[in-house]
Image (cartoon, grey):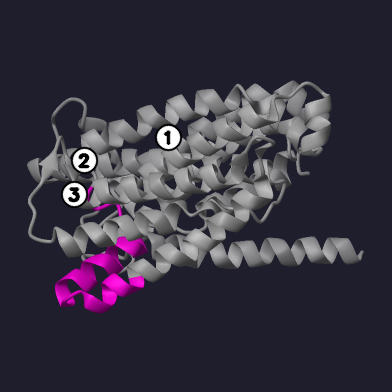
Amino acid sequence: MLFSAQFLQRYWWRLLAVSLLLVVLVAILALTIGAVDIPLSALVHWPQGNLAFQHQLILEQLRLPRILLALGVGALLAISGTVTQGLFRNPLADPSLIGISSGAAAGASIAIVLFSQSAFNLMGISVVTAGAFCGSLLVVGFVYRMSTSAAGTSVSTMLLVGIALTFLAGSITSLLEFFADNDMLRRISLWRMGGLEGANYLSACTVLVIFLIIFTVLYRQKNALNVFLLGESEARHLGIDATRLKKLVVVCVAAGVGLSVALAGTIAFIGLVVPHLVRIMVGPNHRYMIPLTACVGAMLLVLADALARWLIAPTELPVGLVTAFIGAPVFISMLYQRRRLALL
């Protein structure tokens, strides 16, 4: 643990304030990066309306909603990964284990193949987004139903059913890709790679509002999640309603990740790497982990999106590829360091 328990108790609010400040600084930096570079000094004139028309259009219509969406999606994926690892008591757990991402991919693929010519758009929500969100909720609802009995909700059964449905949803997606034409196939592939190019103020505000609700609900369960790390039976003996806690976590994770995947596609490694990184710094206490993972997840996705827009400008990479390229080496490095420390 990078920070001692005494340091965290004494300087926790300062550490959180620094993290929030870094989020703001990274967001401001991302506003200047892209196919058209905007000088940092020009941002000072933005609130006064003394900005060049081209720059103002780029900032207000393209980059600002995209960065706001990245902040919300990154934070949602990170805290979802944190509480999922706490629920399964496994640092390798990820929200995709219970089929959320694969269900969303299957739903989006069905929407692309069956409604490819549809111009349906309700309050900024496309048919593909609606299909992805419904797909994720259907899979999670089935997983929860199958793992719940009169004796309660079995975490191990939830994991096994989630893995089975992940393969089933993946097979459905592959079958649809087999029958899709070239245009449909390209749309499915690009969607599965993840991207924030469809961002608008409605989607960004929706994600941020849902994030605040889910964050509030999960943060109120921080002590229960800490006790749950000791084991489910121990948590019950200490007065924790384990069934209610599991239901609350699954509902929050399903809503948060389902919405994120529906709006931004599949974005890899945020929910897996960020909790690991924060756990190294502050330990497994959810009082510290949930807020800090939200900050780090938001920063990481904003940086990844800025790189996606800048690396091969004016063309942009899918942001899911960038997070995978960043996340995989970081995760392998953390596992290697952990193995080295275990051998000492």
Q: Quadrant of residue 151?
A: top right
Camera-nearest label, 1 or 2: 2
Label ID, residue 343? none
Camera-nearest label, 3 or 1: 3
Question: Is the N terminus in the top left, top right, bottom left or bottom right quadrant?
Answer: top right
Q: Is residue 248 above or below residue 92?
A: above
Locate residue 271, reporting x and y percent.
54, 50
Mark 3, residue position:
127
Within the magenta stretch, is there residue 195?
yes
Mark 1, residue position:
24
CA distance for labels 1 and 2? 19 Å
Mark 2, residue position:
200
Q: Amino acid at mark 1?
A: Val
* Chief SS of the magenta region: helix
Q: Is residue 42 above or below residue 216?
A: below
Q: Is residue 35 left or right of residue 329?
A: left
Q: Quadrant of residue 82?
A: top right
Question: What are the residue bounds of the magenta stretch?
Answer: 174-198
Q: Secondary structure at mark 2?
A: loop
Mark 1 or 2, nearer chain start: 1
Q: Is residue 289 above or below residue 268?
A: above
Give the residue displayed 62% in from the left and 27% down from the top: 244
